[in-house]
Image (cartoon, rainbow, N blue to C red):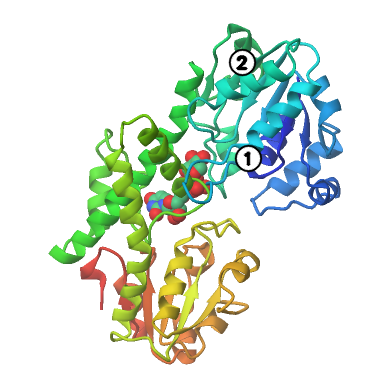
Amino acid sequence: MRITIVGAGYVGLVSGACFADFGHHVTCVDKDATKIDALRNGDIPIFEPRLDDLVAKNSKADRLKFTTELKESVADADIVFIAVGTPSRRGDGHADLSYVYDAAGEIADAIEGFTVVATKSTVPVGTGDEVERIIRERNPKADFVVASNPEFLREGAAIEDFKHPDRIVVGIEDERARSPMSELYRPIYLNKGPLVFTSRRTAELIKYASNSFLAMKITFINEMADLSEAVGADVQDVARVIGLDKRIGSKFLNSGPGFGGSCFPKDTTALVKTANDYERPLSLIETTIAVNDRRKRAMARKVIDAVGGNVRGKRIAMLGLTFKPNTDDMRDAPSLAIAQALKDGGATISAYDPEGMEQARAELPFLDFCHDAYAAAENAEALVIVTEWDQFRALDFTRLKQVMAQPILVDLRNIYRKSEIEPYGFKYRCVGRPHEEI
Ligand code: UDX
């Protein structure tokens, strides 16, 4: 099949490379000429494990192309995906759909022959209707249908998620979309994962409902962590055992410094806005957002308490800045609020992140960026694990103790245990496991 993807950002690029790897002919279109030039030269603008190999392999096989020219690639395509960004609109928190609607207008001018236009960007309920209206008004002769095909991939595991999804959802209003969309995903669902067709509005809501539910699940266990600390219970055991109940499930029950990233914060906020527009407020999700926001700064309080109640004039080392490991993404990362709160308390902060320092520099210019964990720890009164990169799971505590001003570890991701840390003479603080603390 011939696929065109408008928007060579995170979702567009991963989807394009994976569709090409299944044997489809894919063209990724983006207005950013610098980005397209880089991609043609094999330079990937984002950090995602294995994506560079996948792009190189499929470009070489001539199945994956990059261009700034939308017209030609849309004219040739069987399916055109809209995968442009939908950032939170400044001021009101609604998803900003201007890029989606601009893309729809340009696609309208270029359509030739029967074409499925599918939205892959996360878009509020009803956006598919608007995309259809824009194309029809702009080009009444166009022969097209609009489908919704939301993406559920996680950063850092995007290729695996794309190729082995739990489910693929396609929302359609016109039966003519069913066969091309089934053919597109045939290589995946033949082996794995159900392909579910729903109405278009249902598919749009499913994406928001999934992300909001997961955000709520994380927030639930984070509140249980706080309660565990107060009553002397162990949140990891609580999570493990409630997760054994299949109705609850074990995933997304790791307590930590709160959720961040490009999806959960933006999508929960946008869903709350939509619900308010329809006068069906979502109190659970509103509370989830508020609890999560508070939590990020509360983590700084944990660090301050660990060093004796005051960080003024003290050096604190932060390990991990990105919102989670295996990405360079700093969007809504808990490290942003934690670093700011520590700075407000008068601390000097050194930091190290394996991939995110370039991005972090723009957001947190007041940090001292270091080339590794040990350099960051030098003269620090406390070492704080903010993001659980694998390389922080086997730190050399003898070496750390030698360079630090005080041996204190604040483990906001619960990747260590008291029994491992105690022999090195470290004071240990974690999340929701009071019996683990020294
Ligand atoms: C998420 C969804 O998982 C994905 O399906 C959707 O398409 C996009 O949003 P992503 O944001 O890449 O993916 O990361 P994810 O692994 O879901 O983590 C999101 C945040 O939740 C991170 O800050 C992570 O640290 C946090 N988290 C996750 C926890 O604190 N505890 C958990 O148990 C799981």
In the picture, measured across the screen, residue 341 lies left or right of residue 20, that is left
Residue 157, disc:
none
Q: CA distance from mark 2 to mark 1?
A: 20 Å
The location of residue 172, given as percent across then percent down, is 55, 15
Name which quarter of the figure residue 228 lies in.
bottom left
Is 19 located above or below residue 8 in the figure?
A: above
Of the pair 72 and 44, the residue shown nearer to us: 72
In the picture, measured across the screen, residue 129 lies left or right of residue 221, that is right
Residue type (three-letter) at the residue carrying disc 1: Val
Of the pair 301 and 226, the residue shown nearer to us: 301
Of the pair 162 and 276, the residue shown nearer to us: 276
Q: Is residue 253 visible?
A: no
Name which quarter of the figure residue 326 lies in.
bottom right
Residue 182, disc:
2
Judged from the image, the secondary structure of the residue bearing numbered disc 1 is helix
Location of mark 1 (residue): 11
Is 150 located above or below residue 435 in the figure?
A: above
Residue drawn at x 70%, y 32% as measured from the top left:
103
Residue drawn at x 72%, y 27% as measured from the top left:
105
Q: Residue furthest left?
A: 231
Of the pair 225 and 285, the residue shown nearer to us: 285
